[in-house]
Image: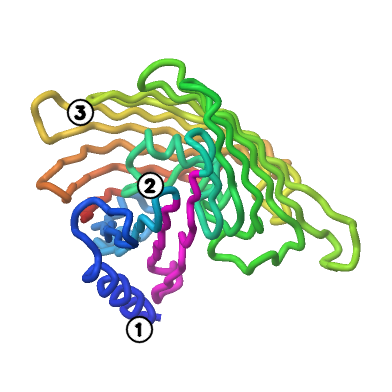
């Protein structure tokens, strides 16, 4: 697996060697970028391993290309370390985006799903934690399919997507159904984002492709966020029902805020998640708390100490300290 990771990285660096280091031009050239998340982790409670651990969490390498005047493309690999040991490498993005008109575009291939991409950009700290949606497996962040975006006016954009529904780490169409997503994005004033999302993910309860006995998992999400140069806040309410996989149904919310300390390289962030699974138990709510300090140490490098607490129902909370190194190019 490590050999495959190194091979994929070499391919991307060869691609970058023939690309322009400046902004991509309309001549088939492109640009290469990447991100790495690396932690020092220390448990702070009796319910987990309290050893100081070095943890490589994620590596992304992205090649963006301007194919023609109205067509762009992206290829992104995603690598990480498995909880059981070893490394994995997946193609997260491999798509072409066609600007059909000034206010309408189509996207084909392996691409980001619609559920939480906008609110994740307001959160802006994927380096230390996924969104609530991604954390609890509500929807994969990428899938294979076709999507469209239509800009109605300066305040409203509508999007739709049809995909396999398995996510970029799953087998193509393994469930026998398709995923359909619909989203409305409202930006009433500068810096404010409001999103409403409805999704269906089909699956075959008989595991028989010759029958039409299909079920649909349903996802509903309402998100809102605000950000300016120094401050951001936001959150979501999300629910999922009738899932194929036991344990994924439920509802919850998350709320977060981040604040840049004036005239300094430091920012503060706090976050609270609550997820209530449909498990027919009275005390099964899971909560997740983050409090951290972001130090912009140099261009392209952030060092982020954070306290994180996870609590599963009536079980004792699991506390840990993370020192995250996040670098990008």
The answer, for residue 325, to whether it is visible in the render is no
From the image, tell me which residue sits under label 2.
129
Q: Which comes before the other along the chain, label 2 or label 3?
A: 2
Spatial distance from mark 1 to mark 3, Cα to Cα?
A: 41 Å
From the image, tell me which residue sits under label 1.
3
Spatial distance from mark 2 to mark 3, Cα to Cα?
A: 19 Å
**Discs 2, 3 touching: Cβ within 8 Å:** no
Of all residues, the one furthest to the top in this rendering is 189
Residue numbers of the magenta segment = 71-99
Q: x, y (%) of residue 263? A: 8, 26
From the image, tell me which residue sits under label 3.
260
Q: From what the image shows, is residue 259 above or below residue 29?
A: above
Seen at 40% across and 76% down, the residue is 86
Q: Which comes before the other along the chain, label 1 or label 3?
A: 1
- Quadrant in which residue 121 is drawn: top left
Tag 1 secondary structure:
helix
- Whether residue 75 appears in magenta in the rendering, the answer is yes
Q: Which mark is residue 168?
A: none
**Front tag of 1 and 3:** 1
- Crowding at dot 2, Cα within 10 Å, few <14 / some 14-19 / many 20+, comes out as few
- Whether residue 191 appears in magenta in the rendering, the answer is no
**Front tag of 2 and 3:** 3
Q: Is 247 situated left or right of 267 in this image?
A: right
- Quadrant in which residue 221 is drawn: top right
Q: x, y (%) of residue 134? A: 50, 48
Q: Which colour scheme is used?
A: rainbow
- Crowding at dot 1, Cα within 10 Å, few <14 / some 14-19 / many 20+, comes out as few
Q: Is 43 situated left or right of 234 in this image?
A: left
**Front tag of 1 and 2:** 1
Tag 3 secondary structure:
strand
């Amino acid at each position: 697996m490590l050999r495959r990771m190194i091979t994929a990285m070499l391919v991307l660096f060869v691609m970058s060697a023939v690309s322009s280091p400046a902004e991509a031009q309309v001549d088939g050239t492109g640009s290469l970028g990447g991100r790495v998340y690396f932690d020092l982790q220390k448990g702070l409670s009796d319910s987990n391993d309290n050893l100081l651990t070095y943890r490589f969490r994620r590596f992304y390498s992205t090649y963006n290309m301007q194919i023609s005047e109205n067509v762009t493309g992206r290829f992104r690999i995603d690598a990480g370390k498995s909880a059981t040991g070893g490394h994995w490498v997946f193609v997260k993005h491999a798509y072409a985006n066609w600007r059909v008109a000034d206010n309408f575009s189509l996207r084909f291939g392996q691409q980001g799903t619609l559920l939480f991409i906008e609110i994740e950009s307001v959160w802006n700290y994927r380096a230390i934690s996924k969104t609530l949606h991604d954390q609890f497996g509500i929807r994969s962040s990428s899938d294979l399919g076709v999507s469209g975006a239509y800009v109605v006016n300066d305040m409203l954009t509508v999007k739709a997507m049809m995909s396999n529904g398995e996510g970029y780490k799953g087998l193509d169409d393994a469930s026998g159904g398709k995923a359909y997503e619909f989203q409305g994005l409202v930006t009433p004033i500068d810096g404010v984002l409001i999103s409403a999302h409805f999704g269906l993910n089909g699956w075959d309860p008989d595991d028989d492709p010759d029958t039409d006995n299909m079920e649909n998992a349903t996802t509903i999400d309402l998100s809102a966020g605000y950000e300016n140069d120094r401050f951001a806040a936001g959150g979501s309410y999300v629910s999922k029902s009738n899932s194929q996989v036991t344990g994924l149904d439920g509802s919850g919310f998350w709320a977060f805020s981040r604040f840049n300390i004036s005239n300094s390289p430091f920012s503060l962030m706090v976050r609270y998640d609550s997820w209530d699974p449909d498990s027919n138990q009275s005390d099964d709510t899971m909560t997740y708390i983050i409090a951290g300090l972001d130090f912009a140490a140099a261009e392209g490098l952030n060092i982020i100490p954070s306290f994180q607490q996870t609590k599963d129902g009536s079980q004792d909370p699991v506390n840990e300290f993370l020192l995250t190194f996040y670098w990008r190019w």
